[in-house]
Amino acid sequence: MNEIFLDTETTGLSFRDNHKIVEIACIETKDLIPTKKIFHKLINPQRDMPNEAFKIHGHSSDLLKTKETFDKVADSFLAFIENKKIIIHNASFDLGFLNHELGLLNKNKIKSENVVDSLSLARSKYPGTSNSLDGLCRKFNIDLSRRDKHNALLDCELLREVYINILDVKEPKLIFTNSNTNNFATDSNTKKVQYSQKVIKANELEASRHKIFMSKEFKKNNY
């Protein structure tokens, strides 16, 4: 079974308050190696964009009003994730929004048994520490220099690296051409690249701040 790394961006924290999805990104992998198949859509939420959300992801109302609405992309989205294991960080948030939108369209909802929540895995393995995507990237020494704002597609890429480290498995070897590291190749003369597997243990200060982080900072860092 192939895997899907999935992330969304929204207008706010709860679909119950009429907040909507504005971006969906999915990266397909096989044995955690990208297949180069990607689903990525900006979505017209048909409502205003709160300033707090705009500061997080940078998607303005003017930009989004030119995009397709969710009902126009739902079928292609469902086809892309069909029969695949779905990996999401803080899955209850994204599934809440996605299944709410799918329910309004009388479409099949995403079943929880097909989903792996990397946040739950991280909390079990690293209790008392920051387990936001940013926090885990710092823990595993994963480059965050491109993440000046939340971006669903970039967050899927980061999540794949984080997930590999959470599982504590060896990074699959990616075969790149020497001239373009975005193109996969099978040439015997190409270079094999591996990510660092360095793990940084939590210190006492991180542990002491855990309760404060979970109650005040978690929502801000994870929607």
Image: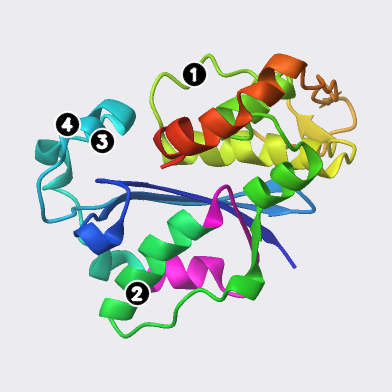
Secondary structure beneath label 4: helix
Image coords of residue 61 (percent x, y)? 12, 40
Q: Magenta residues, as a range? A: 75-91
Q: Which mark is nearer the camera, 1 or 4?
A: 4
Q: Nearer the viewer, residue 179 or 128?
A: 128
Q: Which mark is nearer the camera, 2 or 4?
A: 4
In which image quadrant can residue 15 be found?
bottom left
Give neighbour class at mark 2: few <14, some 14-19, many 20+ (Cα, 10 Å): some
**Quadrant location of the C terminus?**
top left
Secondary structure beneath label 1: loop
Q: Residue at x 56, y 76 (%)?
A: 111
Image coords of residue 167 (percent x, y)? 83, 44
Q: Which residue is mark 1?
A: 146
Residue 83 within the segment the image draws in magenta: yes
Q: Which residue is mark 3?
A: 53
Image coords of residue 42 (percent x, y)? 29, 47
Q: Which residue is mark 4?
A: 51
Q: Nearer the viewer, residue 8 or 124?
A: 124
Distance CA(mark 3)–CA(mark 1): 19 Å
Distance CA(mark 4)–CA(mark 3): 5 Å
Residue 3 within the segment the image draws in magenta: no
Distance CA(mark 3)–CA(mark 2): 22 Å
Q: Residue at x 59, y 37 (%)?
A: 157
Give me the disc on residue 111: none
Tag 4: amino acid? Asn
Secondary structure beneath label 3: helix
Q: Is residue 149 above or below residue 45?
A: above
